[in-house]
Image (spheres, grey):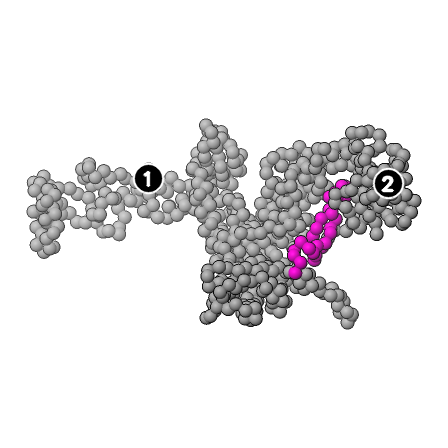
Amino acid sequence: MRRVASLYLPNLPTDRLRRIGARVGRRHDAVPSGLAPRFDPAAPPEIGTRIENCSCPRGGGWRPGARWARREEVAVQIDALPTHQRPPIRELGRRSEAAEVPFRRGPSVQKIERSIAASLPPSGGELPLVTIERSGQRMVLTAVCPQARALGLHVGMALTQAQALVAGLQTQPADPEADAAFLARLGVFAAQRWTPRAAISDPSGLWLDLTGVSHLFGSELRMCERILRFCKRLGFTARIAVAGTTGAAHALARYSGKPIALCASGQEAQAIAALPIAALRIDERALATARRMGIETIGELVAMPRGPLARRFGQSLLTRLDQALGRASEPIDPILPEEPPEALLRLLEPISTPEVIDQVLRDLLAMLVASLEEKGLAARTLALLCTRVDGGEQRIAIGTARPSRDAAHLHRLLAMKIEQIEPGFGIEAMRLVAERCEQLEPQPVAHDLSGGEASPDLSHLIDRLTTRLGSRALFRSSFVESDVPERSVRRIAPLEEGRDWPRNWPRPVRLLSPPERIDKVLAELPDQPPVRFSWRGRMHVVRKADGPERIHGEWWKRRGEAEAVRDYFQIEDEDGARFWLFRRGDGVDPRTGDHSWWLHGAFG
């Protein structure tokens, strides 16, 4: 069962700057440029001034009477002599006072450190700190610390207004690249220490895949507490949330208001129902539309029909909602890419016969299955890559309906495609790669334990049929919420759970796509069913009829269907055949349709 954590650092830019300032305050050699003494090589040094950029630890100068030793050629000659042959200091005219202890801080260094400490914020961080950047002709705030936020400052406010509201406001230029670099380093650390699947979710947070990892730290709660303690030691404010989907974890971490929010798998809808719709990561345009409609929370959004939502907000809103509720998958791109499990065999001699290829394939499967068992994974897609002696490469691939690491079953699927390999002058290397893997989770027992006959597992049969016929040849039909019949059904995977069909109105087993037009229709307008009609060159006389069932067009999807109307009838002819007909229009207003008749399906 998948578990995803969202680590959120709400004050990343300001916390990073305070961390840098605290580190500078602890180091006397990290002197700000405005406080460091400047050294000009062309100007003569002042008496008693400590020269920081000079290799000599003490100051000093030359006596006026020793000008001969100040010439460059003489200095070079003196430096070339051995130490015991050099002239004494008195002859060179240099000062001979005692040198300072190299490791003792002089009064000038202490003065500089006092100036640094005075320029830094207090240890409690009471002084507000903001980051700024230029936007057009003005400077605006891009990040504010909690103290500044408590004083009424917010992101996007003009700097002049902020300085008028808060006296002594500390400002620093925004550095998004440095913030992103720190977040990347934190992600690498998380991938090395907490979970191998860590990714950057946005400029202020990380995603951590805790599937199969949290028990190593005791529990999910203890692991979250350990992560928050680590962030606190670094000087960063953090919040973390764990859920079964990335969208729900992201929303809870940012809008729940709790340092640690744990959501049980399957309870995402209830956990995020009270959160604002901004937690779904939708754009500002969709948020403005929702505010005009009076939609405030995700729960209100879930209760609304999907058709009008797609028309008003676009498909991106429904995609984010499905990702948060677990209806749609959202992959995590790890910051440290993972190599897919694979097995490689380099052959001593080229092979070309199907029997030998099959034997090498068995050996590769045994190696790959052992690697999958070690990682707790199962394969959904396998690719066999055969390298020929001429440098060419042959590739065959298979897929499974469910995650599997059954070597015998996978071998049967791959053996069906061995005949597609063209060995040429011979194959010198074969590589088997599990391109798509999933966690192998336990499946519920489909029957009771009283000794009754177990229901058959159709996954192996579906895999064999799909391998032989193609992935699009095998599917199931599922109901979709739509008033228009041709849009109310979609294809799904053979083992995917479909939605039940509505019971209020019967529908034919087979729908024609597109509907076929019928002619020579005799019917009384506006609401009577046809008496007879001709379809595919044959005349049908109606014996029984039921209807009409009026269906309006979906104006929120297509503007041309704003006034469209269809009247459906269930028809039975003299031979007992039952059809599903409809007339375009309501039989009165020509704007609703041209009053033509169409056959849309057949019963039985």
Q: Position of residue 295 (x, y in %)?
A: 68, 37
Q: Is residue 333 magenta?
A: no
Secondary structure found at label 2: strand
State the residue in front, 401 or 539. Answer: 539
The residue sitting at 42% across, 41% down in the picture is: 121
Task: Tell me if residue 336 comes above or below residue 460 in the rendering.
Answer: above
For the N terminus, the quadrant is bottom right
The residue sitting at 47% across, 48% down in the picture is: 183
Q: Nearer the viewer, mark 2 or mark 1?
A: 2
Label ID, residue 33: 1
Give the residue pinned by disc 2.
Answer: 533
Q: Is residue 471 magenta?
A: yes
Q: Position of residue 298 (x, y in %)?
A: 67, 43
Secondary structure found at label 1: loop
State the residue in front, 288 or 273. Answer: 288
Q: Report, in whole angstroms, how far the alpha carbon at label 2 lies from the one at label 1.
A: 93 Å
* 444 horizontally vs 34: left or right: right
Work out whether residue 194 can be spotted. no
Range of residues picked out in magenta: 468-497
Q: Residue furthest top?
A: 137
The residue sitting at 37% across, 48% down in the picture is: 26
